[in-house]
Amino acid sequence: MLTVRIGRRRHKSQGIRSLFLILAVLGVIFLIVFLLMKSQNHSISWYQEFIGPEGLHVLKESKVSTSSPIQRSNLCGIQKPCPDGDINFYISSGAASVIGPKICVAGKMVMGKMEKNVGEGINIAVLNGKTGEVIKTEFFNMYDGEIEPMIKFLESIERKTIVMIASFDDPATKLNEEARSLIKQLGSSAIDSLAFRDNWVFVGGKAAEGVGVKSNLEKHVKNNRDQNKYDNWPEMTELLGCVPRYLE
């Protein structure tokens, strides 16, 4: 009996090639997805290192809900316990020219980007030495600003006050001997060597008439291209601790 087959018989090797092609396409898709996820995780890790875990926590919280207020305490870091009567503080310099400095007193931000009272150069907060209340804050551009306003500000600081300073980007280009001398009188030992794009944080003050001041609440990181964390800028500098009030 003669049997007639309609259509062409599919060869077994063609089916194997089709299966191999499908697996290859799936493999390429998986590889692309894996590389994208790895790249995203790297970006998050770099940004977390740059702004710190507290900043990343606040960023995540703000994405989840724009209606709930940001917890300000997260921006001031962990506060150091202090003896009765002392004032706790947290200060950080800027990071490169992107992340600004901040000054916190008793867990409250007194200078920062969100307060809109910081800028490139030298940022200064003056506190009442007896109560710890903020008297005034100001920032001075030390790259293309004028030095005279900062000199007048430093000269106006009254005695029995606490002075907190944080650098951002470049704190030294416009500094002259008069300005350095005034800051040195507040207790700084690093001001003489402060240079272009160094990072610097400091707590000092003006004591009673005729009483010299020398502060050990100070950190200074030199700008060194071979050691910098952010190419043209050193790592962010932080300082936290306790400062005693002035007694009557």
Image: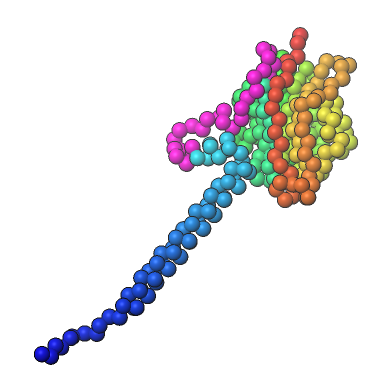
Number of numbered discs: 0
Task: Give the residue at x 65% y 28%.
Answer: 104
Task: Give the residue at x 40% y 67%.
Answer: 23
Whether residue 120 sits left or right of residue 55 in the image: it is right
Where does residue 227 sit, x and y in percent of width and height? 76, 47
In the rendered image of this protein, does residue 162 appear above or below residue 230?
above
In the rendered image of this protein, does residue 235 appear above or below residue 132?
below
* Along the line of sight, the residue nearer the viewer: 168 or 8: 8
Task: Give the residue at x 53% y 53%.
Answer: 38
Where does residue 155 sit, x and y in percent of width and height? 82, 27
Where does residue 42 sit, x and y in percent of width and height? 57, 50
**Location of residue 10 (image quadrant):** bottom left
Whether residue 236 sits left or right of residue 11 in the image: it is right
Q: Is residue 184 magenta?
A: no
In the rendered image of this protein, does residue 30 appear above or below residue 103?
below
In the rendered image of this protein, does residue 117 appear above or below residue 50?
above
- Stretch of the chain drawn in magenta: 61-87
Q: Is residue 71 magenta?
A: yes
* Along the line of sight, the residue nearer the viewer: 213 or 6: 6
Task: Give the residue at x 73% y 15%.
Answer: 245
Main SS class of the magenta portion in the image: loop
* Along the line of sight, the residue nearer the viewer: 140 or 214: 214
